[in-house]
Amino acid sequence: MILGNIQLATMQTGAGILPAAAVVIGDGAIRWAGPEAALPAAFHGRDRLDGGGRLLTPGLIDCHTHLVHGGHRAAEFEARLNGATYADIARAGGGIASTMRATRAATEADLVAQALPRLDALLAEGVTTVEIKSGYGLEIDTELRMLRAARALGLQRMVSVRTTYLAAHALPPEFAGAAQDYLDRVCLPGLAAAHALTLADAVDGFCETIAFDAAQMAQVFDAARALGLPVKLHAEQLSASGGARLAARYGALSADHLEHADAGDAAAMAAAGTVAVLLPGAFYALRETVRPPVAAFRAAGVAMAVATDMNPGTSPLTSILLAINMACTLFRLTVDEAMAGVTRNAARALGLADRGVIAPGLRADLCLWNVESPAELCYRIGFNPLHQRFVQGVPC
């Protein structure tokens, strides 16, 4: 198929927008892309879809979500508005413990059914690849159930799902004050089980004063390395905890959040090729005031990705387009940086070299938009201009 009469944003570095362009799609991949007037003769006569002068970009990639979980925490949101503190909520059994209980009580089918509307919201805004983490079971059986549910979502919808094992997310009440015991009895055995069942594409953790320290996370990363699984890390979100440099030392795909990172962290990440995943939804929902060091990332040459961090507690965000806008308005990313953040750099953050830009040989995951330029995708709020989504060349 020839997709012609388009404005083409390949999202290759420095490529800009090519007017009056065309893309040739075959067998789920991009076969050719360029000015339609230069279409090779070998492709003449193929079925042609008129793009109507619309903008074509790579399919969007949400590279950090907690999409699969039980229940919600709207009541806690309301309680905070009425003056309750996080400590008050925790004492009442709220917070992550609330989501943990709801997730443990849910069947795999329940988890899939609850996650589908959230996934559909992302797909409706052009997402063609989504990462989904475990991390709310905090026991082996439920962590594996979450990963199976995530895999099932990829079978029920036209989307590529990447799964991440995140048992090192928090301590469940039954292991309060016993982090090492939890690692030994739940997190590490669960990781081995997830790998044996081919349920995990990567391994993540939360390195923070309220979660696991760098030495504890190193144990998880060592186990992941022994299994041949790539790693990533929630790092420097609430404090400077050494997570970003730990991630860099292990050659992590990404370090995520990073509000309290510094220039030294940026230099380490740049040397390791670790992507900085910025999560403006959590920054907004938590009313944070310390921003990620975007200038330091630019200066060091750290690739920056943008994601929703969709989760029930600190980023109940199911709009990738709003995440792009927030990255620009709250973190001062440029349009080019924000768009790269949900295409080529998001692909890097997942270790995927076959997507994120429009080039021959790569997956034909594409979005056709009713806009004139990528800037319009970043500037509008609460408006979805998606005309058509393609997953491996199939309109959906």
Image: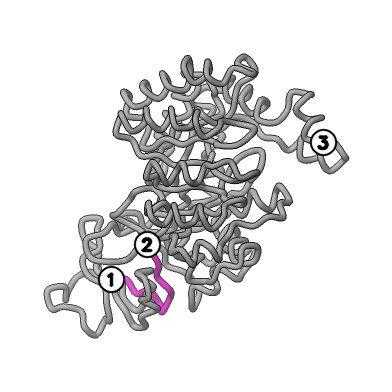
Mark 1 and mark 2 in contact? Answer it, CB < 8 Å. yes
213 or 280: nearer the viewer: 213
Please state, as top left, top right, bottom left or bottom right, where the N terminus lies in the image. Answer: bottom left
Tell me the residue that label 2 is attached to.
366
- The reply to whether residue 370 is in sight is no
Q: Residue at x 49, y 66 (%)?
A: 298
SS for callout 3: loop
Tell me the residue that label 1 is attached to.
23
Depth check, mark 3 against mark 2: the one in front is 3
Please state, as top left, top right, bottom left or bottom right, where the C terminus lies in the image. Answer: bottom left
Q: Of the residues shown, which amino acid type is indicated by label 1?
A: Val
Q: Is residue 334 above or below residue 107?
A: below
Image position of 162 (left or right of 186): left
> In the rendered structure, which segment of residues is drawn in magenta?
49-57
50 inside magenta stretch: yes
Image position of 199 (left or right of 242): left
Q: Residue at x 39, y 60 (%)?
A: 344
